Amino acid sequence: MSNKLYNPVNVLLKQTERVPGVAKDRPQGKDEFSYVTDIYDRLVDKLASEQSRQAGNENIICSYHLRKLVTDSTAITAEELRSFRERGYLKTDLEWPFVLGVIKVDDYKKLKNTRGLDLKLLQFAVSNIVQEVVSEVLPVDAVDLREEHFVLLFDIGKPDEDTYERISASMRKAQTIVNDLYHITFTVALSDLVPSYGELTYSYERTLDYLQYRMNVGANAVITPDIVREKQDNHDAQIPPELERKLIEGIKSGRQEQVHQELDRIRGVISGMSSDAVIQSVVHVGIIIKQTIREINQNKVSPLTLDLRSVDGLVFEKETLDEIFEAFVQILGAIFVDHKAVVENKVQVIVDTIKDVIQSNYANTNLSLQEISDLLKMSPAYVGRIFKKVRDHIGGRLYQRGPSAKRGNPARKKTTGRSTRFRRRSGSARKATSSSCSKSVSARRRRITGSKKSMGM
């Protein structure tokens, strides 16, 4: 009876010997059932591992076919495209008009150089969030091209006038979520309607050109074909000469506020240009700034110490016009700081010199503004403006010297009294002299008039 009951268990144990690796590493079970359970757990783990490996291989194959579809769509047949959908590679129907999008994380180069940041993993997370948000509105597929960007394929169904607005709204929602979670931004460029999958590669390359208009509109933007067409229809490719002239005048005269205003106006003009004209205009602004600084340095004893080579690389280092013109402001800000420091140092030198002259000649009754101006070889008007800065110093010196002189030497007391009363007495003398001169002139005129009457003239 016991043998009959145990026989099924014995058969099950013999079956486990067929499992690879059991003889080499036999499980240590307390009894036959725990032994069989251990073998079963091993088989489940091995099966899961194999399924994961196959899924990984399937993902690799899927990514390969989708990359080929985007980069070489003319080589894909209709049968292959249908097989992609049957095998689950694609959720979108590309045999009907659809929209393509290109997404790029902003400040990619800066993030790439950030230590401890896995940019590929971050890009994968952005892709998943975008797909989840957009799929609430319409089917979408994401294609990782292993570049600095990835591609989205939107199944729009029957196109209508709200198609791009629906896509744009979902993209802006995804941008907000990504920024809240990871504190980064991304920009997306949307293509024109793609008639069918055969035009996919051409539309992809054209949409990459649309992405260049991030320079115009700024980061964290959704660039639609209407925005691009508006810029392309603007045939202005030059900065108005009047704005250039005012910018140059502001830099040379050291008017910081004027320079900032003109830079804002120039940036506004450039932002409305086509992408090629934007690059040319930004380079031109850099040339204007460099030439103006060189002209300033030619007329300065102490040239401005600026690395003008940094101006040349801005158009390649920065991603938006806002960043480029902010760099222009910083470069020119160094000029204004330097100019202000030079002016302040120059004025301070003159002030110190005037103080020294007054301190050395405070008792000189003939010391005047004209004499100080002649000594410094400057105009009296200019020295007079600076003279106001040392007026308190003059009173302080007289206060310090006057009482000490009175307390010390009686002879110096009289000298100090004369020197301090000199301006008042000389002033009254000038008035008396002026009055006497006026009286003599009037008497002379009366004598001449009387003589003419006596002669019958």
Image (cartoon, rainbow, N blue to C red):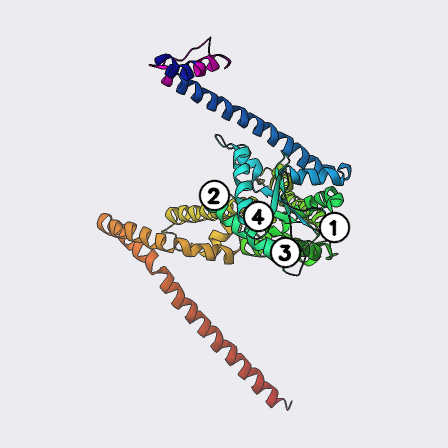
Tally of numbered discs = 4
Of the numbered discs 2 and 4, the one sitting upstream in the chain is: 2
Q: Could you give the CA–CA distance between mark 2 and mark 4, rounded to whole angstroms?
A: 13 Å
Tell me the SS state at disc 4. Answer: loop
Q: Which residue is mark 1?
A: 195
Side of 319 relative to 199 (left or right): left
Q: Quadrant of residue 28?
A: top left
Disc 3 residue type (three-letter): Tyr
Q: Is residue 320 visible?
A: no
Q: Which residue is mark 2?
A: 183
Q: Could you give the CA–CA distance between mark 2 and mark 3, rounded to whole angstroms?
A: 26 Å
From this viewpoint, which residue is outermost toward the bottom? 456
Q: Which residue is mark 4?
A: 219
Side of 401 relative to 74 (left or right): left
Task: State which mark lies toward you, 4 or 3.
Answer: 3
Tell me the SS state at disc 2. Answer: loop
Disc ID at residue 294: none
Q: Residues within 10 Å of mark 4 (few under 14, many from 20)?
A: many
Magenta stretch, main secondary structure, is: loop
Cβ atoms at labels 3 and 1 below 8 Å apart: no
Q: Residues within 10 Å of mark 1 (few under 14, many from 20)?
A: some
Q: Residue at x 73, y 41 (%)?
A: 201
Q: Quadrant of residue 84?
A: top right
Tell me the SS state at disc 3. Answer: helix
Task: State which mark lies toward you, 3 or 1.
Answer: 1
Task: State which mark lies toward you, 1 or 2.
Answer: 1
Q: Which residue is mark 3?
A: 164
Tell me the quarter of the image containing the N terminus. top left
